[in-house]
Amino acid sequence: MARATTDQREPLKNKAYLGHLRTLQAELCGLQAWVKHKGLRAIIIFEGRDAAGKGGVIKALTERLSPRVFRVVALPAPSDREKSQMYLQRYMQHFPAAGEIVIFDRSWYNRAGVEYVMGFCSKQEHRRFLELCPAVEKYITDAGIALIKLWLEVSDKEQKRRFEARVNDPLRQWKLSPMDLPSRSKWYQYSLARDMMLDATDTEHAPWYVVRSDDKKRARLNCISHILSAIPCKPVPRDKITIPKRSDKHAYDDQATLANRTFVREVF
């Protein structure tokens, strides 16, 4: 098991990062083919403090893959109808079928984090969740679904820096949700909630893995590397691909017929 230390290394240079990322993304393409070939099912959960870098990891993980195989689920706040359902019900409808990997950008662990800290659930509901969650996850893994749980841990100093960057950058301001700013003042409440969650749900059948995420680039590479190691795969035989020649049957000037159509103005 990796040692839980704060990473004091220099930030990873962009050229090195892109080189490692390309190699790992090629391996992910191989994993994708293997998952489809064998009909595997997996769930990947990304949790962590606000501004921990979950979105960036998920983008790096999925940008070269088919969204029909690697599906990202990022649910909004529950509707009134969903609030009346069994708690896990709205998550379970997104579970994978054969040949699919579902990525939860936040998951049922909302109850152990933001809902508990911000008072959106009762202490009894929180306690009940922590009691039942390991049993539910045992049911999931016993059904043959691989369950990979990743907690991205950002430091207090780095979270503050990222929040300030969002406030001052119009391209990032959309990332500031109504829950983000209050989370700064409740740093230690979130720490206690994290510790209770890990104590209760870090199990042999569904362990948690903590990822240091102050260095976003290293965090992305480490997450992808871990996922690749968690789902072993083999090369899938591929048929030789031959691009067919264009047929000239029914040939005509197919560009001239567009002459009177409306085109997008070429600003660039």
Image (tube, rainbow, N blue to C red):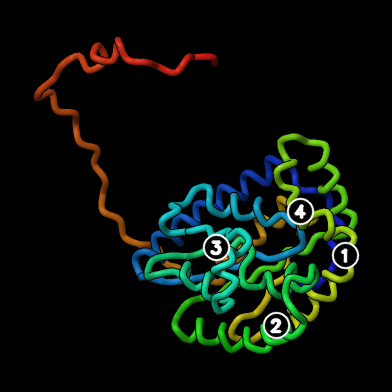
Q: Earlier in the sequence, mark 1 or mark 2?
A: 2
Amino acid type, mark 1 = Trp
Label 1 SS:
helix
The residue located at (26%, 53%) in the rendering is 239
Q: Earlier in the sequence, mark 3 or mark 4?
A: 3
Q: Residues within 10 Å of mark 1 (few under 14, many from 20)?
A: some
Q: Earlier in the sequence, mark 3 or mark 1?
A: 3
Q: Earlier in the sequence, mark 2 or mark 3?
A: 3
- Image: 77 above or below 110: above
**Could you say which quadrant of the image residue 191 lies in?**
bottom right
Question: Closer to us: mark 1 or mark 2?
Answer: 2
The span from disc 3 to disc 4 (Cα, nearest Å) is 23 Å
Q: Which quadrant is home to the N terminus?
A: bottom right
Specify whether 139 is left or right of 99: right
- Residue under numbered circle 2: 125
Specify whether 58 is left or right of 261: right
Question: Closer to us: mark 3 or mark 1?
Answer: 1
The span from disc 3 to disc 1 (Cα, nearest Å) is 26 Å
Q: Are marks 2 and 3 in contact (CB under 8 Å)?
A: no
Label 4 SS:
loop
The residue located at (68%, 76%) in the rendering is 208
Label 3 SS:
strand
The span from disc 1 to disc 2 (Cα, nearest Å) is 22 Å
Q: Earlier in the sequence, mark 4 or mark 1?
A: 4
Question: Closer to us: mark 2 or mark 3?
Answer: 2
- Image: 29 above or below 263: below
- Residue under numbered circle 4: 178
Specify whether 65 is left or right of 87: left
- Residue under numbered circle 1: 187
- Residue under numbered circle 3: 103
